[in-house]
Image: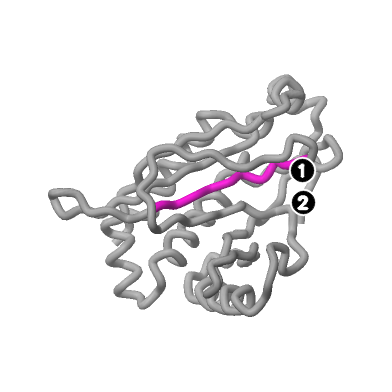
Amino acid sequence: MKHKIDLATWNRNEHFEFFNSFEEPFFGLTTQLDCENAYHKAKTLGVPFSTYYLHKTLVAVNENKPFRLRIENNEVVEFSKIHGSPTVLRDDKTFGFSQINFDPDLVFFTQNAALEVARVKQTTGLFTREFSPNVIHFSVLPWISFTSFSHARSYTLPDSCPKMSFGKMTINTAGKRSIPFSVHVHHGLVDGYDVGVFVNRLQDLLNEK
């Protein structure tokens, strides 16, 4: 479900018009997330760690209205639910795009994720299915603990989907685990304040015991 935002009465209309005219309207940042509790919680529940933090990320996304906004035909629409579209690595080291539909129940989400990952691994190419516009583009680089991140982008194709990336989990000298996290968003829809609210909420969710 979605509904159109009335730009005439939207308090961010000027911001939207300004940044939407840019050749590159996206901005991004990279931070470190404490994942000590999340790692152990995933192990206790028998859930893959990557599935666990993907679920928590989508919980935070769906609670944050700006992250549920998209641009369609130069209009802004708000979706009621946002799903995940992570890349899936195959045995031959190529990858394909997936869509894992969000469910607030971790058990159902984990089942959906396992089925979708298995499906993509049996395919070839990038675009393995029809994709919804109400997704977050995810990637994971478990081999690299990065401190910055950029994305390949086509300026001729309309795009307003946030892009999020996770890196290699590391353990510091105190024995605490952390993971690098990058988020890029369309500035016509999302501001720095909104990213701050989202990242802080995600950290709270990862801290749950």
Residue 173: say if magenta. Answer: no
Q: Which residue is mark 2?
A: 2
Please tell me which residue is depicted at 61% across the width and 44% down the height of the picture: 162
Instruction: Give percent across and percent down for residue 49.
Output: 39, 66
Vertical position of residue 104 compared to residue 25: above or below: below
Q: Is residue 69 left or right of residue 157?
A: left
Q: Is residue 166 magenta?
A: yes
Q: Could you classify mark 2 by the number of other residues whose Cα lies within 10 Å: few (under 14), some (14-19), or many (20 or more)?
A: few
Residue 209 placement, left or right of 73: left
Which element is circle 1 on? strand
Q: Which image quadrant is residue 115 in?
A: bottom right
Horizontal and vertical percent position of residue 208: 33, 58
Quick one: 196 or 122, which is closer to the camera? 122
Image mark for residue 94: none
Q: What's the CA distance linking mark 2 and mark 1?
A: 6 Å
The quarter holding residue 35 reads: bottom left
Q: Is residue 151 above or below residue 127?
A: above
Q: Residue at x 41, y 71 (%)?
A: 48
Which stretch is magenta? 158-167
Q: Position of residue 22 (x, y in %)?
A: 72, 24
Residue 177 higher or lower than 148, as above or below: below
Q: Quadrant of the N terminus?
A: bottom right
Q: Residue lying farthest front?
A: 92
Query: What's the amino acid at mark 1?
Result: Val
What residue is pinned by disc 1?
77
Q: Earlier in the sequence, mark 2 or mark 1?
A: 2
Q: Residues within 10 Å of mark 1 (few under 14, many from 20)?
A: some
Measuring from the top left, give residue 129's x and y in whole percent: 74, 68
Q: Main secondary structure of the magenta part?
A: loop
Left or right: residue 156 versus residue 12 is: right
Kind of residue at disc 2: Lys
- Image marks 2 and 1: residues in contact by CB distance under 8 Å: yes
